[in-house]
Structures are given as C-alpha cells and as structure tokens.
Image: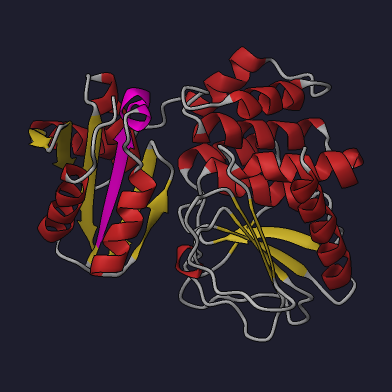
Amino acid sequence: MNAERQDDLAALDAWIKKVSAAGAVPILCGENGDMDTVGSAIALAAAIPNGMACGLHRDKVAKRVAEELDAPFRYIDKKRPTLPRKIGGVICVDAASPGQLGIELPSGIPICVIDHHSTSGWNLDEPDLEIRWAMRATTQIIFAYLQEYCPSALSGPVRRLLLAGLITDTGRFRHADGPALRDGAKMLEGGEIDYASFVELIERDDLTDSDRGAMAAGLSRVKHSTAGTWQLMHTNVSTSEGRMGKVLLVAGAEITLVSRHRDGVTRLSARATRNATSSGVHLGEIMAGIAEKLGGEGGGHDGAAGWSGETDRIAAESAFIHSLSGVVRTD
C-alpha cells in the first residue's frame, strides 16, 4: 500500500474516533442497496461500537446474504427519514453523490464519504472527509481499513459480507484486476468460507412469476443498433434492469442498455464486455455525462453504470446512444 493510502486510512481512523466520541454514527448505503454498499456499511459498523448500517433499500442479493448472516441493518423510511437525535457524524459508503443516498443529510453534521467510483458529485468542507480509491469495490477500502486498524472485527460473517460485495461488483471476478483478486484471496483467509457454496448463495435465482413475465416482455422488445463503432442491444423493462443487462451480455451483446420508467422517473442500466472497456468504453463516464446534460444522477464503473432522472425514457436512451457513438474505439 502506498503512503497516500496509508495516510487516508490514518485520517479515516482519526475521523471515526472523533465523531464516535460525540454521538451515534449512521453508516448510510446508496439507495440502490446493492451488495457492495450494504456489505461495506455492515462490515464497517462492526468496527464502530455506536455505528449502525442503514439505508432505504437492500436489493435481493444483499438482503439474502445479510439475512443469512444475521447481519444488523436498519431501514430508513424515505418519506419520513429518521436518524438518531445525537449524531457525531455520518458515513456514506459506495455513493458517488448525495443524490444517490435517496435522503437529505442532516445539516451541520460531519460527513465521511468512502467510495470507489471514478466520478464524484460531493462538495465537502472541513470537518468532512472523502476517501476515494480507484478500486473494483468499496468493500476493498473497508477491508484495508479493518486490516490496518480493527483486525478483530474481521469475523467470518464480516469477511463474507466484504467478499460478497467484491464478487458482485466484479461480476464474479470477470472485471477484477490484480488488487481485487489479491483482496478476494485475503478475505477468504481465516473465514472458513466454502467459496462454491457461498457463490451459490449469492447467485441463487429468486425470480417471482411477475419478474419472469417482465423479463420475457423485455426480451421480446430487444433491439440491436450500431452506435458509432459499437454494437448495442437495448430494451425496456418494468423491473430487474441489471439482470436483463446480464442476460443480454450472455446472449452475445457487446454493450447493453436497459431502461425503465416508473412513477415519473426513468432509469438506465448499462453493461459492457471486458473487450469493450479495454477498447475505450467507460459507461460510468457516459452516465455522468448524461446527468450533466439531462439532470438526475449518473455514474458507475467502466463496465457497469446507471443513470436516473425525471426525463422521458426515449430521450434518455437517445442521449446514451449519442454519447456512445462518440466514443472512439482504440483497438
């Protein structure tokens, strides 16, 4: 680990000690509630006596894994969000901007952001802190902190939560790099984890009949387009955008775009093959650019990203296709 990252971890430890002495420390997840954000929050809370992992939502995988491990998590009501009265500070994990939390943060409270996305929509001041590392998952940052400052918190369940976040954010290590693979191996050490069984728990299919119907309808609407030099498969669904994108990748798509419009809000979810990202595509940058043009919130990784906002679905899809067309293929 380089000196800059060691300084980051030291600053994080000092920040946590200071704010936890002043009151409760809610650890907020991103609104999407995926395994990386939920696993990061619960694992970090294990090292802070008055810390509590909380958020608006847990997706199916995060809910299943957390419940299997009996991991504490507090839901927040979006319409009437309530936090402890005496708060020392708030930690936000795996959220590229305040809008990705889904709630307004209390004013006058120190904020710490821990994230691995390349884009940031945060505007922080003293005594706030931002830890932003170019990693494949936020759980890697939490793992580094726990190894250095709270090794006793690395119990079997905590290691599983961290590993699950890394597995899901790397697409079962398909998008992993050297550090991600090394961290995954270290997370397994001492945790008595049967890796094959654990992956089965993560990937277990919990589709309802309604989900299957939505997937079938989405498949019937799939279109193939050429966006500049890129081959795109796109469709719209009523739910499970991420799952549909993965299905289209397995079917041979180079890049996928799946949209959903519900309650006045449009969501875009995009996926790309490793070959596409190696050839110049960075979906997170495209989605961040759409947010600048159309408003809303957008960002993510090179191979998986999303956007949401109050814009017509067709207009949002067109903005994505136009942006993708402008990406120069480097291979």
Q: Answer whether residue 271 is magenta in the image.
A: yes
Which quadrant of the figure has residue 158?
Answer: top right
Is residue 153 visible in the rendered structure shown here? no
Q: Could you say which is closer to the camera, residue 128 or residue 267?
A: 128
Horizontal and vertical percent for residue 66?
Answer: 63, 41
Q: Is residue 87 above or below residue 224?
A: below
Q: Could you say which is closer to the camera, residue 280 or residue 238?
A: 280
In-image side of 36 versus 252 (left or right): right
Q: How is the image coloured?
A: secondary structure
Assign the C terminus to one quadrant of the image: top left
Which quadrant of the figure has residue 62?
Answer: top right
Q: Is residue 176 above or below residue 138?
A: above
Q: Residue at x 12, y 60 (%)?
A: 315
Horizontal and vertical percent for residue 289?
Answer: 30, 59
Assign the N terminus to one quadrant of the image: top right
Q: Which residues are magenta?
A: 266-278
Q: Residue at x 60, y 48 (%)?
A: 38
Q: Residue at x 76, y 24 (%)?
A: 186
Q: Residue at x 71, y 20 (%)?
A: 185
Is residue 149 visible in the rendered structure shown here? yes
